[in-house]
């Protein structure tokens, strides 16, 4: 089945530093999503991207939907301690001939730790 | 806000037991999903449902079944629990028009099978 390669697997950074993570796939997706999971919680949506080339910001977060539709990146600027958590990318697989929309494929996650 | 509620945060079961994980959502969403989360593997789809009494296999359905008798409730069933099913289980829901309504997750059930 389709797979997403998310990197890096983990990051340990100093407060105030910028962070960048990305996901790549051999398949085309029609939607890219970025989620964050705090310890003991379920993932929460950060940013949704629906169009190739789209660049979207949400506060200190910026994400882009790659032109080839096979990749996406997430940047976090000026990190703070509450940015700690696991970040997941997810791509939606288009379903042909279906009234329903496709399921999500998730990356392996990037664990972010921020040192105050 | 959408609320997806999983009935248990932590469960400990013995090998061979039948296990039920319950999930309820309050936003009248058509789609519901069960994922399991394991370190280094991300979230993997077990089963999903886009309507009452409808179900479709995800990527790792072996050893699991599901039930969707009511729109708001989606149950994951482990017919005979095994130690390799020790994991974090996440339920999620979304509207039929997925492009405008990404997945909303519950807080997860951490299942340990001994």
Image (tube, coloured by chain):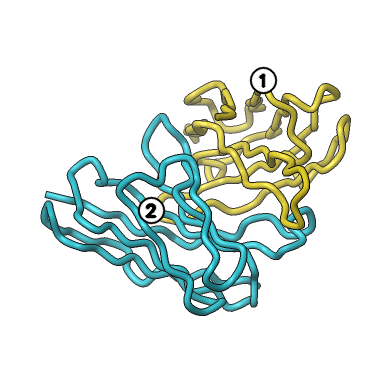
Chain colours: A yellow, B cyan
Say if A84 sits above or below B50 in the image.
above
Which numbered tag is attached to residue B63? Answer: none
The quadrant in which residue A24 appears is: top right
Which residue, given by chain and number where applicable, does mark 2 sit on? B89
Instruction: Please give left or right for residue A65 compared with residue B36 in the image.
Output: right
Say if A57 sits above or below B66 in the image.
above
Say if A101 sits above or below B53 in the image.
above
Q: Are marks 2 and 1 in contact (CB under 8 Å)?
A: no
User: Which chain is mark 1 on?
Assistant: A
Say if B82 sits above or below B51 in the image.
above
The quadrant in which residue B2 appears is: bottom right
Instruction: Please give left or right for residue B88 compared with residue B102 in the image.
Output: left
Q: Do labels 2 and 1 share a chain?
A: no
Q: Residue at x 32, y 64 (%)?
A: B9
Which residue, given by chain and number where applicable, does mark 1 sit on? A26
Q: Which residue is drawn at 48% across and 24% down?
A: A9
């Amino acid at each position: 089945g389709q797979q997403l390669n998310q990197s890096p697997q983990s990051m340990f950074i100093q407060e105030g530093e910028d962070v960048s993570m990305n996901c790549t796939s051999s398949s085309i997706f029609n939607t890219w999503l970025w989620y964050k999971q705090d310890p003991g919680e379920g993932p929460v949506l950060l940013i949704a991207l629906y169009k190739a080339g789209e660049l979207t910001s949400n506060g200190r977060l910026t994400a882009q939907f790659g032109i080839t539709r096979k990749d996406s990146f997430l940047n976090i600027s000026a990190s703070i301690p509450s940015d700690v958590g696991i970040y997941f990318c997810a791509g939606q697989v288009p379903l042909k001939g279906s009234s329903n929309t496709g399921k999500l494929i998730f990356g392996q996650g990037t664990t972010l730790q921020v040192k105050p | 806000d959408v609320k997806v509620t999983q009935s248990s945060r932590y469960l400990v079961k013995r090998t061979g037991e039948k296990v039920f994980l319950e999930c309820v959502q309050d936003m009248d969403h058509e789609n519901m999903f069960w994922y399991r989360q394991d370190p280094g593997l991300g979230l993997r789809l077990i089963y999903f449902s886009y309507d009452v009494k409808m179900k479709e296999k995800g990527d790792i359905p072996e050893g699991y079944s599901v039930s969707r008798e009511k729109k708001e409730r989606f149950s994951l069933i482990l017919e005979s629990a095994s130690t390799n099913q020790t994991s974090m289980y996440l339920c999620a829901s979304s509207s039929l028009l997925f492009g405008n309504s990404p997945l909303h997750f519950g807080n997860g059930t951490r299942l340990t099978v001994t």
